[in-house]
Amino acid sequence: MDGSRKSVHAAENKTRHRIIIGDARKMAELADESVHLVVTSPPYWQLKDYGNGRLIGLVEKRERREEALQLLERIAVGQKAFLRFDAVTHDKDDMLLCYLYLQNRTFLNAQLVRRGLVAVDEQVAFRYKPRFLEIAKGNHG
């Protein structure tokens, strides 16, 4: 390839860089099919302030809240955590719904149920509902 062809090719592929801070689900300022690379920072799970997220399938037991937070802090702080999602990703209040796993495959949603620190949400459908109900049943019998 000669030098002139190379410079024409480079001009055709000129890129433009923009930093946009905001909700990636609402980006009206970008045309469809216009993004080729996205670099994000993961939503770091804040153990003591769930912010805009909720663990799928769980209902807080207010009287066990502090104990649940202490458990999460003891086993999860400093660990890599991964979020997994179900068919429904947001609740009626637009809070992110997720299953939370540690790198060693500890399933934190299930751990909280197993220890009786939360109740199982029986009002909504989710993938692990039968498993969570079975675990909770074992706590009572």
Image (cartoon, grey):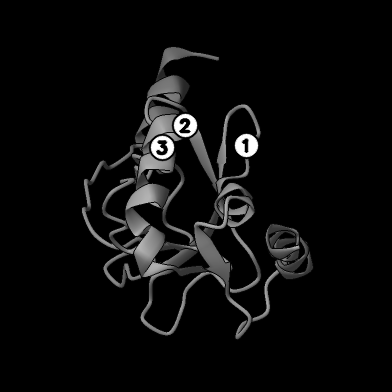
Q: Which mark is residue 15?
A: none
Q: Are marks 2 and 1 in contact (CB under 8 Å)?
A: yes
- Kindly report the distance in space between the C-alpha atoms of the residues bearing marks 1 and 3: 45 Å
Name the N-terminal-most of marks 1 and 3.
3
Q: Position of residue 121 (x, y in %)?
A: 58, 76
Q: Position of residue 97 (x, y in %)?
A: 49, 65
Q: Amino acid at mark 2?
A: Ile
Q: Amino acid at mark 1?
A: Thr
Instruction: Residue under label 3, please give it.
Output: 13
Name the N-terminal-most of marks 2 and 1.
2
Task: Name above or below for residue 29 compared with residue 13.
Answer: below
Q: Which mark is residue 106?
A: 1
Instruction: Residue under label 2, please give it.
Output: 75
Where does the N terminus fall, quadrant-wise? top right
- Regarding mark 3 in the picture, which secondary structure is present there? loop
Residue drawn at the location 26% of the way across and 54% of the way down: 49
Residue drawn at the location 65% of the way across and 71% of the way down: 87
Q: Position of residue 113 (x, y in %)?
A: 60, 57
